[in-house]
Image: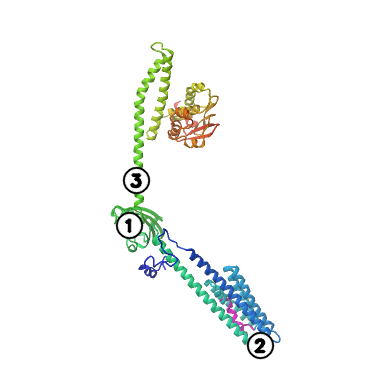
Amino acid sequence: MQGGWSLQRRESLQGLTGEAKLTDHVRRTDDPGLTLISPKRRRRSAAAADAERRFAVSWHLAWALVMATAAGVVALRSAQPPAMELAALGVSAAAGLVGAVLAEMAGVTGAALAILVWAAAGGAACLMTGGGSGPLETWCLAPLAASAAFGRPRLLALGAAAGVAAAAAVALGSTFLVLPKTPDPLATWLNLLALATTGLGFAAGLVALQGKVKGDDARARDAELALREALDHQPQLLMALYPGGRILEAFGEAPLGLETRHMAGRNLSDLVSADDRALVEAALTRAASEGSSDAAFVPAHDPQGWCVLTLRRMSSTRLVGALRDARAQRSREAELHEAREKAEQQNAGKSRFLANMSHELRTPLNAIMGFSDIMRQRLFGPMSERYAEYADLIHESGEHLLELINDILDMSKIEAERFELAREDFDARDAVSAVLRLMRGQADRAGISLRGDLPAEPLEADADRRAVKQIAFNLISNALKFTPKGGAVTVSARAEGPMLEIVVADTGVGLSPEDLSRIGRPYEQAGDADQRAAGSGLGLSLVRAFARLHGGEMTLQSTLGEGTTVTVRMPVLVEREAQALGFAADG
């Protein structure tokens, strides 16, 4: 039997329909799926095991009852009860009782112990009644009869060995010991008793064993048919192949246009389009040498189809393959690819539009800010206070709009992957200090304490100076926006190995967990309507984007009502040893 199915077995199933291959308890229905092991079958297996146990217990109890009856008859019919014969019958009855208990409680181990008990009891009974020439010599076969009664074929060898051992012990005892002799009338009666109990017990055990074997065979056939039916109805085509590609067996659902029963004997390459045959043959070679491979191809019978093949090595001369129709999957992938390209094109178009609009808006805005600045400084003469106030408002609004345009332009470049860092060596403290000086006036007007905490030693960085200043500016501006009057904003910059760490902490309103999960994505804002109107929602997203462009990250920690801490870490610091070598080279 090769692989669980002999040639004769396969031929016997060749002409059967799927329904004919199924037993009564395994039937394909209109419901999806296939029930391989029904509750009825499980109950039947459990009932069979319970019946075997009950038979073994009954067999042993019947033996003990017969022995007890025989002992009673012998005692009643004898004027002087024969002690040794009654002891022999008692030993045999005791073996029956012990065997019944072990059969009920101890399973296979109990059965093995019971067989050993039978060997000892049979040998002892023989020795008590004259040994090998005595009337109970047949009881040396009692272990074999008991092993048959347990209904376990693998215990027969143990029963036979135990019987031979008992017979050998009796033979040795008969040779070297002086054994009691049983009187002739009683000896004849005991001899008949031994022959009858051993013969009937052995016959009953063999009948039960035969039923057990037949039941096991039936269950094995059911399992084979259920497994075959499961293989035939699973959604892929499973194949056993030679490494060269010849199909030995096929089970399951073949791709559209093929039939499983015609697959055996064909070569796998016959199913593949001419353009993809080299790919499949390479996959077969790779699976035979490396243990596994995968391939996708257009089937020869369907130019519009698409199949995916997975190969695994079973042995040096066998491969197993799973072939599935992936037409729908390929169609979905093509739709997703098309949708992705369309979305990318739309996003690129949006980015180009924003970039162009930003440039178009910046030109007139520069003129507005320039003329409003001239008016603010009264370069061409005095103005009324109201006009001067209007000029200040125009200039401030222009600055705000210019900041917004610059943010949108930077974000559009980053999203389009066209933003290039202008790296240079500089002291990061200078960039942070410049932003602190720039934001000091805004903090003072808002009644907020703005404090910088910078180290005494330089923070030499290899980074984009404008990006570092933009990071500090956006973080401080955001902190001031969400910190009420009387609050504090602390800005620190420090070195952590090669990492430049910029931390901005405020004592503002803080963020809720919902806002914290959103903040950092483009155009996402938190706070009330006034605070939302004061920005574009690009500040923190630009900080995160600039940090990632430098290979770093941004993290937020916030508690509602207590404040927020934003930390930016970037691996941009130049090691001091390298700086020293650079200074030495310059010298």
* Display coloring: rainbow
* 408 versus 193 height, above or below: above
The reply to whether the magenta stretch includes residue 75 is: no
Is label 2 in a helix, a strand or a loop? Answer: loop
Toward the bottom, the furthest residue is 184
Magenta-drawn segment: 130-144
Residue at label 2? 183
Disc 3 to disc 1, C-alpha distance: 22 Å
**x, y percentage for residue 439?**
48, 23
Q: Which badge, 2 or 1, comes first in the chain's sequence?
A: 2
**x, y percentage for residue 481?**
49, 27
* 335 versus 212 height, above or below: above
* Label 3 environment density (alpha carbons within 10 Å; few <14, some 14–19, many ≥20): few
Residue at label 1? 256
Q: Amino acid at mark 2?
A: Pro
Q: Residue at x 59, y 73 (%)?
A: 57
* 25 versus 196 height, above or below: above
Q: Amino acid at mark 3?
A: Glu
Question: Which label number is shown at residue 335?
Answer: 3
Q: Main secondary structure of the magenta part?
A: helix
Is label 1 in a helix, a strand or a loop? Answer: loop
Q: Amino acid at mark 1?
A: Leu
Disc 2 to disc 1, C-alpha distance: 87 Å
Closer to the camera in the image, 493 or 367: 367
Q: Residue at x 35, y 22 (%)?
A: 364
- Whether residue 177 can be seen here: no
Quadrant of the rendered image containing residue 535: top left
